[in-house]
Amino acid sequence: MRIGFFVWEYPPGISGELGIYAENISRELIDMGNDISVFTMNNGELKTREVIRGVDVNRPMLIDGSNILPLFITEDLRKWDTGLKFFNDVLIYNVLSATKFVNELIKKEGYEFDIICAHDWLSAIAGLMIKKELGLPFVFHFHSTEWGRKLDGGSDSETVMYIEEAAANAADGIITVSYPMQEDLIRHGIEAEKIRVCWNGVSTELYDPNRLDYSAIQELRNGYGISTEDKMILFVGRLTPVKGIVNLVKAMPTVISRHPEVKLVILGRGELEKTILDLISRLGIADNVKPNFIFASEEERILHYGACDIAVFPSLYEPSGIVALEAMAMAKPVVVGARGISGFRDQVIPSGHDQTGIHVDGSNSADIAWGINSLLENPEAAKAMGERGRVRVERYFTWDRTAKCTIDVYEEIIGECKV
């Protein structure tokens, strides 16, 4: 089928999980024999159209209209203050993308699309416009929600929630990334019959412990001052409140008191960098906690997973959580925040013969410390959990499985729209 694919992040403009998803799913869909035209953001320095690994990538060039937006925007948007430029970019990107899709690709170039999909509110407006203009089957993908994102330290925007609701209502079908997310959408009034779940995935070819360069791993550990006798705990992610990173640092004195050989490596960037440094200093744990404030490349993440003994992701809200899949694919036991809306609950089995890790309350530093200590005190069991995690990822969480699930939903919706 030919798919119109609207997503805010796409290579090389990747800043989070949505971009990782978009890059991998589009490649898999192409490999399955589909044609895809992606519409994504342009930072002003990228080509407005090019083909990347078979994907037709379109990036409209934006202009700044934030000076006129206050003339007609809602009071809710006025509260965005400096963030108004961001909303301007979202709005202009959507309008230009929808216009190019309809007038250039379809009317001028004669493309015939079977379906369009929009990912999160950032691309929903384009989906709404094209659905109204052409009546094409429309799938809205919920990777997160505005009411969930407010846990990240911000206030929920009525405008964004309205856009999400409008897209959900107009869509012929909805795909989300986990069963906890499906339950949350239904709880918030989204029509249950529309919603399907397609789990995110990971490349088990790239994330493969058998491909590791052990000399590079030793060099990485040495760089952090971690000896072969030490135990390395790894956190990877944005340094924001919703990721539970502050509570993880607060848990470390308890862990260190029982396991002084432990070293925590924090890999990521975000607004909590100074808070983390201050907390490390105040708790007196600088010898055991090693922050590395970078946006890690895929190669760097793989090497860090290979070097660690345990991976910890104590999120307070995590619709999917690709980082846990990456760690599991590298055969590492994981400690994950599983309270509330957490896709980690789908991924990580917390008990029984198939256990792959431990569920904790990411808002409770004592619970995080308990989870880490449980693995440290049972190294053979922890190693077996990691090995089972690799098997679980191979069985259920690969990008080709995600793509197959997605295409199955698309075909179902196209069929229903023809009736």
Image (cartoon, rainbow, N blue to C red):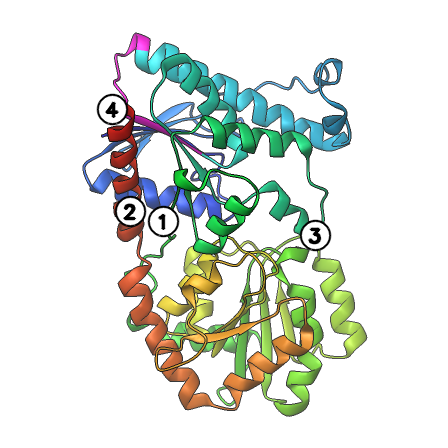
Q: Which span is picked out in magenta? A: 107-118
Quadrant in which the N terminus is drawn: top left
Which residue bears the numbered disc 3?
271
* Residue depth check, mark 1 versus mark 4: number of the one nearer the observer: 4
* Residue depth check, mark 2 versus mark 3: number of the one nearer the observer: 2
The residue under label 4 is which amino acid type? Answer: Val
Image coordinates for residue 192, horizontal then vertical, percent = 44, 42
Name the foreground residue: 175 vs 169.
169
The residue under label 3 is which amino acid type? Answer: Glu
Helix, strand or loop at label 4? It is: loop
Q: Earlier in the sequence, mark 2 or mark 3?
A: 3
Helix, strand or loop at label 2? It is: helix
What distance separates the C-alpha of mark 4 from that of mark 3? 50 Å
Which residue bears the numbered disc 1?
198
Image coordinates for residue 166, horizontal then vertical, percent = 53, 27
Q: Residues within 10 Å of mark 3 (few under 14, many from 20)?
A: few
